[in-house]
Image (cartoon, helix red, strand yellow):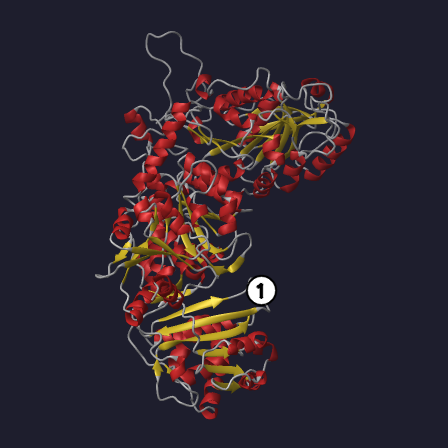
Amino acid sequence: MSTLTTTTPGAPPPKKVNRIGLEVLNYKGSKTTLCAGCGHNSISERIVECFYELGVEPWTVAKFSGIGCSSKSPAYFLGMSHGFNAVHGRMPAIATGALLANRNLLGLGVSGDGDTASIGIGQFMHMVRRNMPMIYVIEDNGVYGLTKGQFSATADLGSTLKTGTVNDLPPFDCCALALRWGATFVARSFSGDKRQMQAIFKTAIAHKGLSVIDIISPCVTFNDHQGSTKSYSYMKDHETMLQDLDFVPFFDEISVEIPEGEVTDVELHDGSHLRIRKLHRDFDPTNRLASLELLEEAEGKGEVLTGVLYLNTSKPTFLEHLNLTDEPVATLPESRIRPPKAALEQVMEELR
Amino acid sequence: MSTLEVSPADTQPGQSSHAVTNDFSIQIATVNGSGSQTANSVLMRSLFQMGIPVSGKNMFPSNIAGLPTWFTIRASKHGYIGRRKEIDFLVAMNPETAREDVMNLESGAAVVYDEPLKLDAFRSDLNFYPVPFDKLVAAVCPEAKLRKLVRNMIYDGVVAQLLSIEMPEVHKALSKQFGKKKAKAVELNWGACQAGFEYAARTFTKTDPFRVERMNATAGKIIIDGNAACALGCMFAGVTVVTWYPITPSSSLVETLMGYMRRFRHDPETGKATYAIVQAEDELASIGMALGAGWAGARSMTSTAGPGISLMSEFIGLGYYADIPTVVFDVERVGPSTGLPTRTQQGDLMSAAFLSHGDTKHPMMFPSSPEECFSMSVEAFNFAERFQTPVFVMTDLDLGMNNWMSDAFEYPEAPIDRGKVLTAEDLEKLGGFARYKDLDGDGVGYRTLPGTNHPKASYFTRGSGHNEKAQYTEREDDYINNMDRLAHKFEAMRKHVPESVVRIAEKAKIGFVAIGTSDYAVRESCDQLKSEYDIDASYLRLRAYPFTEQLLDFIGRHERVYVVDQNRDAQLLGLMRLELDVSLIAKLRSLRYYGGLPLDARTVTDEIVKQEGK
């Protein structure tokens, strides 16, 4: 069942559809209630585009979020996907449970920096440790918006609030944590960079393990001032793009020759390819140690590195560790989840 | 009547003329970590195999090795398997507690003890049987490092000889304990057991009255603990996602479940699991995963105890408010805080009933036996999906971790009830759905599972305000409608929860209301009250919350109703107060015990006699 037919005889010219016959409209959600200019809205738009362009069946996607501005956003994209807005900092548990129940779901989690790095650091780390197969997006603005402008745990040392209060604690770098402790695709981007975000999202959709994507997404109301390190202007001055990324979906024929030496081509789980063209420095994103070193170095220099920080396509996911049956356990028939009477009789005999 | 057929005063040391047969309790005092569990289980099982109703209670410290532990075995020809306060037969192996153990005995009791402890110096009114354990064990176990492990088996032999337990049954129990693969261990232990038996036979003249005699009261029955029974119930309920965090006394529930699932829930062809069991990082995560799984259509569960219940509070409110099924097992222990983690209590009734902030209330089931642990576990999964809400199965340490004699479990013949779930075909016919619309008048809406292959299948689940279509709303009327629907759903549950078990005594002016493991003490106390004080008492055993009409009728027909609570603050009575009419509340009296041991009949009887002014 399923594909919506969008053409009827005698109607105006057919609307543009993707490879499964859906319009981009079918990937949208309800109208955003976030502030005009909020980075999160740009991220929602990229999600809509990427899922549309790749022709992902929206009913195979489950959206998850915690609490906060970022966590409201799943209502604003993929309206044909089930969504679950959980409690503060504990979206990973809900997502983990849902994906255990139905391993065929494509899990898409959207969280914020407070939801992930402050209240949610525990569940975040355990999700990372499990390499839980899902996409986990951090819409990172370094500040609590819904409670009107307090620091979160990703706020940089020395950055200031609108009130002038200086942050005197160092930040958690969620990308460093994720790649050190088990995530298999780790990237950082900027909500203002449409092209980079698209390549990263599409890679995440094709990747079979945990994708952690930290996106600097300025809060125009509480953290876009002088003194903020998560503002549009700060990013303009401090962002360093690591690579030029090009995503080639599995359904497109690869025609262009890859120039040797400059571009690394990584084949992803579903047959898609990510082509990584190095920019300023020599850095291999399949080398975890090199990534950590690079992040450490950038922090010292006050640079915000964006691009693919780590990609590992071979590490088994948590679901693979569990030796789960191929079908979703949630909908197995009774005959497969209730052992026969003889099994109970056998156990009873052992207990006599 | 029964337990006091022969009061200790009637029995003087040296007299065994008044034989007390199949009606006494044995207490074995050891140090934890000394491997006494095998010896104790074998002793209990030997009595069981001789057809004598039996129960075993382990009183152990929250510690790995070195602290005192007591195991009590009660044999009762009348079938009373609750705790008996009085100890008739002591096996004193722990030097730390030996003096106190002996001083607490009533006159006429028997004491088997490690000879160097010289316990006979403390009392002259007991029957003493000193045993040189070290000497005996050295003779049967040449390997010094194994001696500690088999030393305790010697007392099994001594006790068997003194009580006339049939040795072939001891051997059979021992073989069962170790299984076929450990023939060597059986042989070694059996040697120690025989050494004890022979030592007793040639050394002691029996001076105490206690003995056993073969009966036929355990045929077909099994021995199992409540956690294992719940585990079996979960497996036969068709559980598919289990997420948990270790905590005493609930850990063995999931650990036992893992063992059974490995045996019975892997696809015979592919070897793959038809379930997932995940040890979460904490209870915040275990309940979150269980809810995520329940939302996605799994039969999900978690298992915990009081501290875990506290941590689950926020998520449970979301489960309630967003209509998500899951099953939570609460094997209660003594709180608050860390409390007494290895002692029993019914202390989480209030917190579970209203867990979370705002207006919340949750159904609870109260099994009192392994059979009910099994059948109610099956029932709880159906109930959770039928009513789309978290369901609590409230057991306690006494039920969960102690070994109980039980009838064999009956296979659940009724098909699994997955509740109101719309498929893609349903959606095609209906053209859409409103997630929280009460179409059937029971407060339960129709849901779809994520992954349902239809463009109209999706809806958004949230803990924030939502209307019938699951859309975000802060409107006053939407909020009230939804909360009223949830209240109505709770009311609708009353007709579907397990019914109470009611025993009316014809002339009774008083009645008992109790739940769970209080059952054993209350039933025995009813008999004591009748035979010793000529007091008739009726008894209603509640098996679920919300309460049913039966409770109102029961209170209505009696003058005074004693509500039995294994907690300080009369939580069960408190729950009743919240919803009963004042005329009924006026009849309620409280009978509470909260010392952490399994409730015993004598405590109940004494309290009733006191309150009734007899």
Q: Position of residue A343 (x, y in %)?
A: 34, 58
**Screen quadrant of the C terminus of chain B:** bottom left
Kindly identify the amino acid type of the residue bearing the numbered disc 1: Ile
Viewer-closest of B295 and B557: B557
Vertical placement of residue B30 versus B467, above or below:
below
| Mark 1 residue element | loop
**Screen quadrant of the N terminus of chain B:** bottom left
Q: Position of residue A139 (x, y in %)?
A: 60, 27
Would you call the spot at circle 1 few (<14 residues within 10 Å), some (14-19), or many (20 or more)? few
Q: Position of residue B98 (x, y in %)?
A: 55, 77
Farthest residue in the left direction? B506
Q: Give the tally of numbered discs.
A: 1
Q: Is residue B267 visible?
A: no
Quadrant location of residue B475? Answer: top left
Vertical placement of residue A333 versus B532, above or below:
above
Residue depicted at 36% across the width and 13% down the height = A7
Q: Position of residue A171 (x, y in %)?
A: 70, 33
Quadrant location of residue A300? Answer: top right
Vertical placement of residue B119 versus B397, above or below:
below
Viewer-closest of A67 and A165: A165
Viewer-closest of A198 and B399: B399
Quadrant location of residue B300? Answer: top left
Vertical placement of residue A98 versus B424, above or below:
below
Pointer 1 chain: B
Residue depicted at 31% across the width and 60% down the height = B409
Residue bearing mark 1: B64
